[in-house]
Amino acid sequence: MASVVASAPLIPCIVSGGAGMRLWPLSREAEPKPFIRLADGQSLLQKSLLRAAAQPGTGRVLTVTNRELLFRTLDDYRTVAPEGLALDFLLEPMGRNTAAAIAAAALHVQAHFGDAVQLLVLPADHLVLDAEAFAAAVRSARELAAMGQLVTFGIRPDRAETGFGYIEQGDALGPGFRAKRFVEKPDAVTAQTYVDGGRHLWNAGMFCFQVGSLLEQLQLHAPAVLAACRGALEGGSRLENTQGCQRELAAVAFAQAPDISIDHALMEHSDRVAVVPCDIGWSDIGSWEALRALTPADADGNQVRGDCVLHDVHDCYIDAHRRTVGVVGVQGLVIVDTPDALLVADAKHSQDVRFIAQTLKRRGDASYRQHRSVNRPWGVYTVLEDAERFKIKRIVVHPQAALSLQMHHHRSEHWVVVSGTARVTNGEREFLLHTNESTFIPAGHRHRLTNPGLIDLVMIEVQSGEYLGEDDIVRFDDVYGRAPAEKQEIV
């Protein structure tokens, strides 16, 4: 069997996205959990890419993500991707859960590389600390996948965890076991019986499939998912590049896919599901308590990041960004301070942070969707002040980068160059601006900002008008392939 596995190509597929709820305010809808930086400076997404690329014989990695997260993803990949690794993307117009993401990936791989390819599906926001144990688990999963099994990875539990789903092991099968039953998140008593019994594993949400076997079983158990994804691929657009290819899924067809997980759509119904038990140092970083467990505590049981002053504080996690945080006489809290939002929570209830994020979303609060600093394909902008009729931004444009040629209906803009050189299109005029020079963009004028230099262009933008929303934009031309359309959210 090892020779069969060795001859079957492997394409890791990273499924990336999320609503940014469980680790709010550090994660947001526009910058969800995969982009969170850990103490070593790498994001969970970067670690996932490196873990995928490290598997023997891997020459390309496929990523399924939301269209709006593409350039943020490329920024993360660019700094860590091994030379020569092909990076392919399937871009979702909206989230339809893991069944649709995996089905689209399988159809894409089948069309380009055939039925025999094995697909290793990895969530972008999970952490694996033991690379050797993970590689061994992948080898076992590949052996089972070569037998036509749909393989999932099960983590041997070390505690009675109520926040995870479980997989009950059945009869032995090759290097793993048949998956007898999938169990939803249990109560504490039931979870403890699972741990004591030794036959239940945490469901890690990682999978290995032979593409032909996966598509056959999807056709049998989830034909609506498969049909919608096939239509989304056929009706979508394709862009080749030197590192791989990007395919945008057609929105109308993809919206017809049932919003369902791969577990509910397929794994719970198929009779060809196997599980590989493993100890790989796994965490889904699903709460602030899970994230704090990665940081050593001081003598008082505190984990502190940033500039903090503590007095009589015990067993707290404190994450401070950009300003000093003072804490006095408290115990067992999670305190997370960001430039535009502050979280204070009892550590025992850190799983409930999602209720705060859900409330903010219902209210239309911007702090649910994004941080004050927002990454764009051309650089980054930071909102310094946001009032009723004016907004002030600090804009950084990377060398040789350009914003789209655009126009606003309801606002005018003043641009002041802080450092670097700007090439400005303002109506019919095009000219250069240098440090301490400025220009005024009236509402209704076509305009574009370009950095022709070799260093970052830094400028201050002052917007004024009766409406300052990011969706007041008409885009006429864009070098990043974003289609010109009214009321787009990306500047």
Image (cartoon, grey):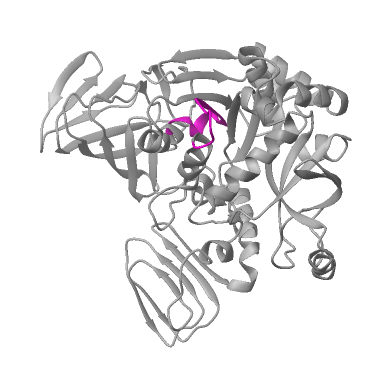
Left of 118 or right of it: where is 339? left
Name the image quarter holding residue 122. top right
**Left or right, residue 443 beside residue 281:** left
**Picture quarter with the N terminus:** top right
Identify which residue, 387 or 490, lies in the foreground.
490
> Which residue: 65% across, 13% down?
111
User: Residue 260's x, y, as percent?
Assistant: 77, 37
Residue in the foreground of this view, choosing between 447 and 92: 92
Question: In this picture, is 326 found above or below 283?
Answer: below
At a point 60% along the width and 53% down the height, the residue shown is: 280
Q: The magenta stretch spans which residues?
A: 54-71
Q: Which of the 4 quarters of the picture holds residue 306?
A: bottom left
Query: Quick check: is 8 in the magenta stretch?
Result: no
Percent across and percent down for residue 310 are 38, 81
Residue displayed at 63% across by 34% down: 120
Picture coordinates of residue 409, whole percent (x, y): 40, 26
Residue 272: percent from left, percent from top? 85, 34
Q: Is residue 69 magenta?
A: yes
